[in-house]
Amino acid sequence: MLNKKWMIGITVIGVLFAGIAAAEEKVDSSTYDKIWSYAKVVDNDDAAVLQSRAFTGRLQGDAYRFDSDDPGSVSDMDWRRFRAGGKVVLFNDFTIHAEADLDLNNVNNSDFYKRLTDAYISWSASKAFKLKVGKQSAGFTLDGATSSKKLLTLERSVVAGNLWFTSEYFTGISGSGTVDGWNYKLGGFSSDGGDEFGDFDSGWFSLASIGRDVSENTELRIDYVHNDPNYSGDVGTKKLTDVASIITKTQWDSFGFWTDLSYALGDDDQSQSDLIGLELMPFYDFNDTWQGVARYSMVHCTDGPGAVMGRYPKKNLSGSKYENVHEFYLGVNCYLYGHKLKWQTGVEYNLAQNDSAGDDYNGWGVTSGIRLSW
């Protein structure tokens, strides 16, 4: 008898392929607009107090298989993310947003609830300044600053996996906005990796990001993070003291090309090597529905093994670390309703080297998944 995970998966995949068939018949986008409008309970810009109240969330499911000579193959169907919550807009300028991260792989036990993700209050004074207080995404690097709802690949690259803080959501305060064409974000956050707001006993980190359009087709952004954790607490950051990234996003009609060059200083007290990361991601929009994407990403350690593989290749590697990690990805995306409903499939080749221990990885993998958000 099929377990609940597979039964839910088969149902969702059936709905997905019905959606693909509908897309091929060029269903009017207003059909999707009507379906998604049910998530917004209140939508009244003219109201004096409550302008908007909506349910928010995302559902992401993957089927994957990765093979290598050592340690062998790993395959499964995984509910990658399921989040649910709500967002309200008050007095035009104030937003309250809260979401919980839930685990559909463990519906029948106490692990179903995982943590709070977004849990903040924001105030938008103007386009030039927005203040956000509470638990929020601390995004930097190309993929780390991209919501999982809008990734062009199924998973973030090994650059984000090693140099970004993959806990993602931290309690703190940030200010952001656009001034004279410059986009900026400044923030200070607790390094605590607790499931809720944390105990503020794990140190702190600061984040600064600035960017602008440097030409008609290209956006340039620079991110910098200084991290000062206290390892006696529940630390959710990496064992890195400073991270700097230079990100470019270029678009010529249907062709795009995104890059990320990052460098991180390892914490010597934690025996963490410095890291150099590079990501190159070209993509092409065949039409409004179909998109092809390729990605090469790598992480190099300057002083001994200190980098890990991507999410699925490392499933059965027992915490192995490497001196060099390379990832090659080729995929296709089917956008049924933009990023709100899409089907993504990617083939990967992963190569990692640990010359000091003679422990290398060489393998292929394929992942196919749905991404739904509201």
Image (spheres, rainbow, N blue to C red):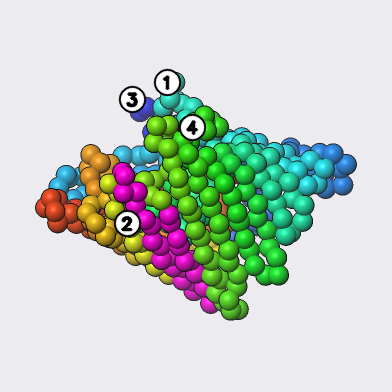
Amino acid type at image mark 2? Asp
Q: Residue furthest front?
A: 269
Between disc 4 and disc 3, whose residue precedes? Answer: 3
Q: Name the residue located 26 percent from the left edge and 60 percent from the top edge.
A: 302
Amino acid identity at mark 1: Asn
Quadrant, the N terminus: top left
Q: CA distance from mark 2 to mark 4?
A: 25 Å
> Disc 3 on helix, strand or loop?
loop
> How many discs mark residues in the rendered view?
4
Residue that label 4 marks: 201
Of circles 3 and 2, the one toward us is 2
Marked residue nearer the N-terminal end (2 or 4): 4
- Residue at the disc numbered 2: 274
Q: Is residue 154 visible?
A: no
Distance, label 4 to label 3, CA atoms, is: 47 Å
Which segment did they paint magenta? Answer: 242-270
Q: Relative to residue 54, is residue 169 drawn left or right?
A: left
Distance between the alpha carbons at the discs numbered 1 and 3: 20 Å
Q: What amino acid is at disc 3?
A: Met
Would you name the residue on which mark 1 appears? 109
Q: Specify few, some or many for label 3: CA neighbours under 10 Å numbering under 14, 14-19, or 20 or more.
A: few
Task: Determine contact: label 4, label 1, CB under 8 Å.
Answer: no
Q: Quadrant of the C terminus?
A: top right
Number of the front mark, 4 or 1:
4
Task: Please tell me whether mark 1 sits on a helix, a strand or a loop.
Answer: loop
Q: Residue at x 77, y 56 (%)?
A: 126
Q: Amino acid at mark 4?
A: Asp
36 sits left or right of 325 in the view: right
